[in-house]
Amino acid sequence: MTPVSIKPKAVVFVDFEHWYISMTKMYERKPDIKGWYTEMSGKYNVTEVCFFGDFSHPALRAEIPRIREVTNFVIETQNVSPRHKKDYTDFIMLDHIYQRAMTGNDIDTFIIFSGDGHFSSVVSFLCIKLGKNVGIYGVRDAISNQLKNSASWVIEIPTKNAENLEYYRMILRNLKRLAEVSQGKKKKQRPAFWPTVEAVSKYNDADKEKVTNVLRQMIEEGYIYQTTERLRTKTVKVLNVDWKKVDKDGIFEV
């Protein structure tokens, strides 16, 4: 009889200000809340997820409907004091984590989504004193080394592979735009490798070497393929997009 795999039971605490502000400033992308939750819940039996933040900020408040797709535990941390403008998110999160630690005998794993070094003490307490597995999710290049060193494991978002996603989309936007411009015209624009690299890097102010490497990677992965066409006096290799594969893998909205 095949043994049943039992996922560790986990509770999750999310510093949404860290996630949202770091992602939008550093990567010009909003948090993929549902994708993150799906990936995490594939590994853990997630019993509680709490999001913390000052949702009086319009940008954060607009994200509440997406947060509620994965949890109803949304903790408002707005400081209403007219005298003291201190950010209370960390303190309120810490209080909730310590309270849950005191009643969490049935919990195997504590997961904290933050990059703030203030959480290193509670992480050490959970790991060393209570013997818990403690994981950190945080935005890449915005996580305290002290916090990383305190945890059982760390996952940085976006992953290194995901960093190429925006370059994929830059290239696909360029090729889609050329196809739309050429539609219905006798003289169609036929995108080749190096002109595409030049156009994408210039239009997006992107690193040319990075665009070159990502375009090659897209060809290797089958998102883009090359066909040979004869144009008057010369033969050129033309870039074509497998839009069905692109759509299937969700890397671009066709």
Image (cartoon, helix red, strand yellow):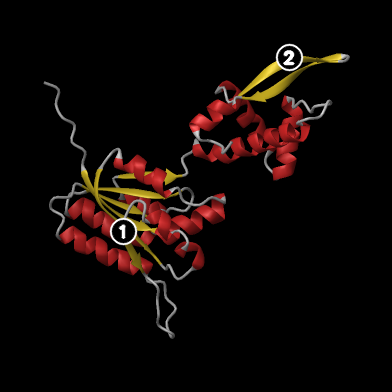
Where does the image place residue 171, in percent across and percent down from the top left? 65, 35
CA gap, disc 1 and disc 2: 55 Å
246 versus 82 height, above or below: above
The location of residue 12, given as percent across then percent down, is 29, 53
Which of disc 2 and disc 1 is earlier in sequence? 1
Measuring from the top left, give residue 214's x and y in whole percent. 61, 31
Residue type beneath disc 1? Asn
Q: Give neighbour class at mark 2: few <14, some 14-19, many 20+ (Cα, 10 Å).
A: few
Badge 2 is on which residue? 228
**Which residue is depicted at the point 74% across and 34% down?**
178
For the point 13% across and 50% down, the residue is 106
Nearest the viewer among 119 and 72 is 72
Left-right relation of 27 to 177? left
Instruction: Give neighbour class at mark 1: few <14, some 14-19, many 20+ (Cα, 10 Å).
Output: some
Image-quadrant location for residue 19: bottom left
Image-quadrant location for residue 7: top left
Residue at position x 37%, y 54% in the image: 146
